[in-house]
Amino acid sequence: MNYELKKFLLLLWAVVASECAHAQLLSVGTDMAADALMAPNMGFELVTGERTTLGLHAFYCAKPWWESETKEIMGVQPELRYFFSGRPMHKHFVGVGGIATLYDMAWKGKIYDGMAAGAGLTFGYVFNLTKRLNIDAHAGFGVIVYRHKEYYKYDNYDVDYSIGGRTRSNATGYFLLPTRIGVSLTYILK
């Protein structure tokens, strides 16, 4: 992971942590489905009103289960949720969120190295197990815009797509894709 990205993620985490310290209700959680797929992740959710929460979810994966050649995938997902029950972190919700990812991965003999960003909607339900422990089931879809270098594993990419000594992206576009699907275990801190 490059130094600038590490510095940015550390700064983002510090800002979220300092803002959350003053929160009235704050939860921390992990997506168990992503954990099962060997993609460590962590999320924070902060109550912002009687029916709304603001969350930030981050993930990183160095060697996913589906491909041993993948170098890394990392991203963040901010999300604003509206709860229909009149109480945040309880029952049905709809969310509006974004996603930003950096990736360097192999898939079926091709290399994809670049970034993607997008926005979408999330729908879900929060099951309250105890006063502080919840299970959050959610599914979302949205538009993802990507820009990356795409080439076959043994191509001479750095020479073929280099202009003025700088390697350029050769693939851009967008897809309508799932942006967030999972089951999270969350713990209310405050």
Image (tube, rainbow, N blue to C red):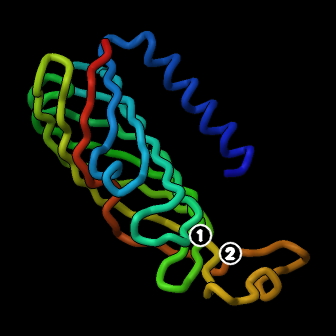
Q: Which residue is mark 2?
A: 169
| Residue located 11% across and 27% down the image | 128
- What amino acid type is highlighted by mark number 2? Ser
**Picture quarter with the C terminus:** top left
User: CA–CA distance between discs 1 and 2?
Assistant: 7 Å
| Residue located 78% across and 88% down the image | 160
Q: Are marks 1 and 2 in contact (CB under 8 Å)?
A: yes
| Residue located 32% across and 11% down the image | 24
User: In this orientation, does residue 115 appear?
Assistant: yes
Q: Secondary structure at mark 2?
A: loop
User: Residue 116 in the image: x percent, y percent?
Assistant: 53, 62
| Residue located 35% across and 27% down the image | 28
- What amino acid type is highlighted by mark number 1? Arg
Q: Badge 1, how many Cα within 10 Å: few under 14, some, many 20+?
A: some
Q: Does 150 sit left or right of 101 as displayed? A: right
Q: Which residue is mark 1?
A: 147
Foreground pick, 93 / 43 = 43
- Residue 17 drawn above or below residue 83: above
Q: Does 98 sit left or right of 18 as displayed? A: left
- Residue 93 drawn above or below residue 20: below
User: In this orientation, does residue 121 appear?
Assistant: no
Foreground pick, 85 / 40 = 40
User: Residue 42 in the image: x percent, y percent?
Assistant: 41, 37
Foreground pick, 144 / 106 = 106
